[in-house]
Amino acid sequence: MAGPALSRSPQDESLYIIRGLTKVYGEGPTAVHALRGIDLELPRSAMVVLLGASGSGKSTFLNIVGGLDEATDGEVFFEGQELTAFGPAELTEYRRNSVSFVFQFYNLVASLTARENVSLITEIADDPMTPEEALALVGLEKRIDHFPSQLSGGEQQRVAIARAIAKRPKVMFCDEPTGALDSQTGVIVLDALDQVNRELGTTTLLITHNVVIADMADRLLRFADGELVEDRDNPHRVAPSELRW
Amino acid sequence: MVRLPAWLGALDRKLLRDIWRLRSQAFAIALVIAAGIGMVVMSFGMIRSLEATRDAYYDRYRFADIFASARRFSESLVNDVQSLDGVSIAEGRLTSNGTLDIPGIAEPITTRIHSLPRVGGMPRVNALVLRSGRLPNPVRPDEVLASEKFADAARIGLGDTIEVLLYGKKQRLRVVGTALSPEYVYAIGPGQIFPDNRRFGVLWMGEEHLAAALNSSNAYNEVLIRLEHGAVAPEVVRRVDNLLERYGGRGAAPRSDQISDRFLENELSQLGQMTAILPPIFLGVAAFLINMVLSRLVESEREIIGLLTAFGYRNRAIMWHYAKLALVLSLPGLVLGLILGSWMGRGLAGLYQEFFVFPFLTYRAGSDVFLISCLITITVVLIGAAQTVRRIGRLKAAEAMRPPVPPNYSGGIARLIGKIRKLDEPTRIILRGLVRRPLRSMLGSFGVAAALGLYVASAGSMDNVGMMTDLLFHQANRADISVSFAEPRDERVLFELERLPGVMRVEPVCYIAATLSAGHRSRSESLTGMKRDSDLNRLVDIDDGLVQPPVKGLMLSTILAKQLAVAPGDRVEVNITEGRRPHLTLPVRSILKSPVGNPAYVDFASLGPLMRETPLASGAYLSVDPDQADALYRKLKAMPIIAGFSQRAAALNGIDETVGETMGIVTLFNTAFSALIVFGVVYNNARISLAERARDLVSLRVLGYQRSEVSYILLGELALIVIASLPLGALFGYYLSQYLASSMSGDLFVMPFALSTATIAFAILLVLMTAAVSSLFVSSRLNRLDLVSVLKTRE
Ligand SMILES: Nc1ncnc2c1ncn2[C@@H]1O[C@H](COP(=O)(O)OP(=O)(O)OP(=O)(O)O)[C@@H](O)[C@H]1O
Ligand SMILES: [Mg+2]
């Protein structure tokens, strides 16, 4: 996949190289231009926060980079390989081995316990943690055998994070992980993400509507109407526990 | 919740818990599958067992390949037959009909008597299975064997003496043993279609003694032939016919024309037909239910599917997960079906032994029948799951993760519903719900219709048999008693009969053995001479009712006409094989759709000129004053001329007992099965609407609607589905019943189609009742719904 020119390129360090990424839903007059040519490079182990108004294209971006959706145009390179040229089977391998997701509504399987929800993922991973380790990382070692219906929203979201980190992914994609949570619980969840990013060096892309959360990131990306309108580094990254909203 | 073993993967845990959650629906599916598979196992196994038993029996007891009879021939002719190419064994014997007088039974009993060979006493062809006692001692003229079922039914014990009127002479015979013969697997008296063991029996006695009784020493009237492997039966038949021609040969016939074998063969083919028709309907409904449950489940698990995709589960793995769920869902049905089928098979084997007498009949399905059942189940499940599973394959992760689009109620009809002013809101909800998923509503109706049709068809076969009995015993044969004569007599015998006590009316009947042929096709049948305007024995056409015998020429039964490939206007060669044996060519005047048998009719009055002798009667129909019946029987028992006897009331009784009982059991099964299907379909429909509507319904409750009002919404939709299914199901049942009737009709009888409105009405009642019961189940669930928890769940 990797073009030889690219592997010799100076930006070799970057985990992702994104060029002219475009996404159009539908055709003709009703077509929606969700992404209008995004150019971007993302380094390893960064904590990146994505901001932007509703409908600005954040989720679309995340889904394409996460290998859930296909781009209309442009290229995404992951570790030098062209993701946008992957077939369905390669995309599946990519999602299986390299990346993880955390969603706004947790998406736990209701008929599985916390531990089983994590095993669902560790069972198909190459070098996973045990579900117990993963749940301990998010502070849920005591709730291992509870079903989702027996957990609070924040606890459910932490199970979702445990599930995401258990396979030791290179990248975590979090689409509004605190969107459905109050601020205190939100902080606990963000703390878990922050810890994983620091300790395991997991590159994290985090979508939020909450500008305050940007302070815990190394870098901030702002979307507006399918374009990247702001891209800045945050030299003064703070711990989630210091965030207030 | 049940503890699951540690080695079980997370997805499999989910699967088991899902099934536990869906258990009541799974149960309904299991029952429907069980019914279908049960039927497959039962009938396949039964066919298999019957065939294996028959083949072993025929082989071990050397059932004849060819039967030939003539008036009288000598032993040397048997040797001639023996030396024909392809003949392995030829054995001569004497056969005669007679009547039996048994203490405790008022009426005379028709019996057939065969001779046992002089040497060894055991026939080499059609060997007997000795069931009790011993073979008759050759030096004792009075010793006989009796057929086992008859001895049982008539309460004849070993050592008992019976009186037989044989060839005009009363003989006192002693029963020394009971036996079975491959010739009498299905043992029916002359002119009957159902076995009546009390009124028809077979006896075997030493050849010399029977010959003496029949005044026929050193002669035979039948020759039985076993063929060598690879012999060409029709060729041998032709040569035997040639040999017997001079001795009054009545035409040799291959085994496939032998009456018992024909009935057995007919039964097997009917069983095969049933298996081809009914189980597919059950399994079709099962597939439909699986489709319904699975597509609903997948719908509600879109996000889980998206999640699994997002985390790198391969499409195949996810599809397999749901296919596996469907398979596991059907597993209990399969197991239940196998058990049920074996159990019903054993029961059926028991029933069969009422009709078909084998020395042994064990129902054994065999592992391949089980294997086939498993394969069938898997196929059915996969068909049911296919559409849904394919949809999973097409589901895009990014789309699945998005919350589902709110259902679209803006279609044309839905808007129309909005315009109808008079409707109250709950009714509007019902109608829109139906319109929104027209396919599912339709399929639901189809499912119920299938069940209704199935019931109509199976209960309808009772109607058909009822009609058959009515045609035979009320319309065609209206004589209280029919007798057959030891040999043809002229009309004077009728006066003799008329003078007997209690006889009110006598009508003659005439059977003449003949071979009918057209082109290269030929059949040995009897020509029946019918009196015009007769009152006791009439010609009845299934479609046209009463008809008169043809003025000149032949009236053929539908089956015979088909066998000879002739139509009205064609000419048929008729070689009479008795009397002066004239060779005639007669035109086919008309075709009679006759319920039973294969007759060819001619006008009694035309017989004289045709036969070139005064017409003779081979039997008579009598109407009798019931008060004097016993006196009449006493006289008849003593009349040498009477060789056969049958009583309408007894025959009717026999049919009621055996056939009625059997059909009753079968109908009971089918009723239960149909109820299961209705329940399965209605209940599943209701549960799924409940799951889809729970939030809406609970919201209504929160807004102050009463339980009954909310139930109305849920059940109203069901009621409409069920009501829509009624005309459809009745129609389907009508055609299915018609199809079953025609598939029951073989070359032995034509089953009339006589579905009654009462049957349809009862079927509808059954469906409505089952639907009501399943509604009760669902609405009690609705009432138990916890308002808060339903509102909290996101869906
Ligand atoms: N499947 C789709 N078909 C058509 N348009 C779509 C589809 N998915 C997204 N869009 C459109 O693409 C645009 C970007 O959507 P996206 O979900 O990426 O926004 P977002 O920034 O994540 O918004 P939010 O903050 O509300 O989640 C929106 O205008 C949306 O309506
Ligand atoms: Mg979004």
Image: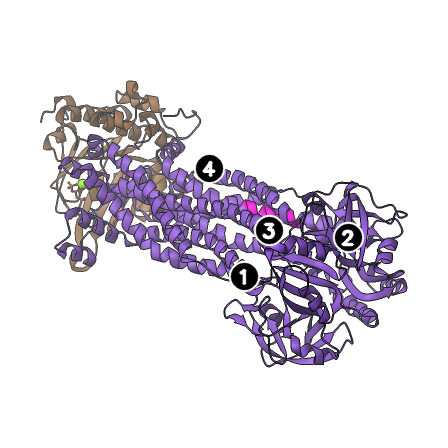
Chain colours: A brown, B purple
- x and y percentages locating residue B2 in the rendered image: 39, 25
Q: Earlier in the sequence, mark 4 or mark 3?
A: 4
Q: Earlier in the sequence, mark 2 or mark 3?
A: 2
Q: Which mark is residue B654?
A: 3
Mark 3 C-beta to ligand 1 under 8 Å = no
- Mark 2 vs mark 4: in front: 2
- x and y percentages locating residue B223 in the rendered image: 81, 61
Q: Earlier in the sequence, mark 2 or mark 1?
A: 2
User: Please, what is the three-letter code of the amino acid marked with disc 2?
Assistant: Val
Where does label 1 land, which residue?
B474
Whole-angstrom CA distance, mark 2 to mark 1, is 31 Å
- x and y percentages locating residue B624 in the rendered image: 61, 60
Q: Residues within 10 Å of mark 4 (few under 14, many from 20)?
A: some
Whole-angstrom CA distance, mark 2 to mark 3, is 23 Å
Mark 2 C-beta to ligand 1 under 8 Å = no
Residue B252, above or below A223: below
Q: Chain of mark 4?
A: B
Which residue is at the far top? Answer: A142
Magenta span contains residue B13:
no
